[in-house]
Amino acid sequence: MSIRHGLLALLERGQMYGYQLRTAFEESTGSTWPLNIGQVYTTLSRLERDGLVRSLPESEAGQRPYEITDAGRADLALWFATPISRNDRPRDELAIKLALALTTPGVDVRSVVQTQRSATMRTLQELTRLKYASDRPEDLPWRLVLDAMVFQAEAEVRWLDHCESSLVRHRPAGPGPAIGPAPVEAVDHADEEARR
Amino acid sequence: MTIGNGTAPPSGPDGAVLEVRDAHRTHGVGPAAVHALRGVSLTVHPGELVAVMGPSGSGKSTLLALAGGLDSPTAGEVRVEDQPLGALDRRRLARLRRRRIGYIFQNLNLLGSLTAAENVALPLELDGLGVRRARRLAADALAEVGLSELGDRFPDQLSGGQQQRVAIARALVGERRLVLADEPTGALDSQTGEAVLHLLRRRVNAGAAGVLVTHEARHAAWADRVVFLRDGTLVDSTAPLASAEQLLTGSGR
């Protein structure tokens, strides 16, 4: 995503100036995605250049509000209607790291897996704690953002469990084709990520 | 993982509720022997919830059975509130299990011919408590799990989630200091499963010690500390989080 679409969605509620947009953005993501004001203004000026928002006259307090244009509204509607592609996401550094650990001499792969799993588990504990620190109805949007992070961390722990089991069966490639099926699968996954 | 020095007073505020010391559990002998646990140590203090994660066959349920006195170690020691379980005779062990230890299993084991309230009161009545007092404590426990109104229902008149809460009330009734849960969210949908964890967490925050066996990271995340078992040994553990008791009090708001 796109801070672009985030700002367009906020402006769809009504005109706002930069600081208001930043505050509203952070509120709607439960501060899990902090923005600096520079990012907000850079994005606004690009949106204006592309005709998706228009700036309004400055207020007496010197604040310049922005409003969404019809083109901006159409762009926003398209964004909501289009599924997010996996290919647009950043490469999975962890998968690549493990694949490399497996083929780099002298690296204790199990220890890499276990260290990562403890760290991810800890993140998951912290997210769970955050999630239950508030159960007010108006917190729903950011609880859902937290849930997304919870499910991602959970998936990572499951994948690391899977790697650990695969490593138990794995015999390092000797002078023959001795690599078991599971580690090959892990490498394939990483290759796939790397090709993106 | 901390190992207590064994001299802590049984009821002292710093005394561990559960201490498993270098526990081994072997089934069978000779070359056919299966080593379910190979030297596991685990200490759980009041107000602490520890999650045990690991694949099937890693020894999770064996560890829980040893902690609850349902099975004994081949070597090593298990202490509950500083009492070595191996040194108790059968009657005293049974009494300790009924009074101080609560079990929550995936298989609920509710008796179909008894009402929810009677199911919850049963361990207390078996323990020789008067029926009226047992029923009053059962009513408290049912209130704790939000089922005050349903005490007169029979298990088959309750939903799966409600039955699970009755089983939890039975595990929490009276003054249980050690609550052991084995995949307690098993067949439940995710919202109901979280309600179960909520109840477990609340009792632990009120001063009990808890051990939660699960293969789901999302559930283990409710714990203060997560330990990983593989092939009967602890391979890894997360550091305890600070201010664990804040989870439900919401004081971080």
Image: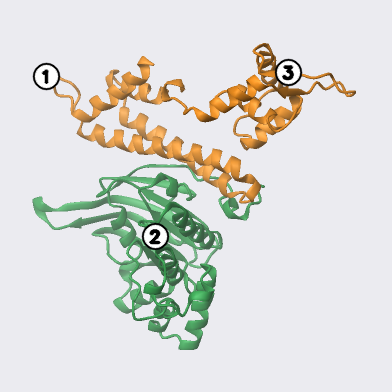
Chain colours: A orange, B green
Q: Position of residue B210 (x, y in %)?
A: 45, 59
Q: Residue at x 25, y 32 (%)?
A: A167
Q: Secondary structure at mark 2?
A: strand
Residue underneath mark 2 = B181
Task: From the viewer's side, name the closer residue of A103 and B25.
Answer: A103
Vertical position of residue A51 compared to residue B82: above or below: above
Q: The C terminus of chain A lies in which quarter of the figure?
A: top left
In this rendering, which labeled residue sits more in front, label 3 or label 2?
3
How far apart, in angstroms, are the residues tagged by discs 1 and 2?
A: 47 Å
Identity of the amino acid at label 3? Arg
Disc on res. A136 = none
The answer to whether the residue labelled 3 contacts the one labelled 2, judged by CB atoms less than 8 Å apart, is no
Disc 3: CA contacts within 10 A as few (<14), some (14-19) or many (>=20) = some
Q: Secondary structure at mark 3?
A: strand
Q: Residue at x 58, y 44 (%)?
A: A130
Compare marks 3 and 1 and give the one earlier in the sequence. 3
User: Are the residues under badges 1 and 2 in a single subunit?
Assistant: no
Disc 1: CA contacts within 10 A as few (<14), some (14-19) or many (>=20) = few
**In the figure, is residue B100 to the left or right of B202?**
left
Vertical position of residue B136 compared to residue A110: above or below: below
Task: From the viewer's side, name the closer residue of A182 and A109.
Answer: A182
Task: From the viewer's side, name the closer residue of B96 and A75.
Answer: A75
Using the rendered image of the protein, determine whether residue B1 is visible from the camera's viewpoint: no
Task: From the viewer's side, name the closer residue of B48 and B105.
Answer: B105
Q: Position of residue B47 (x, y in %)?
A: 53, 58
Q: Position of residue B76 (x, y in %)?
A: 29, 57
How far apart, in angstroms, are the residues tagged by discs 3 and 2?
A: 58 Å
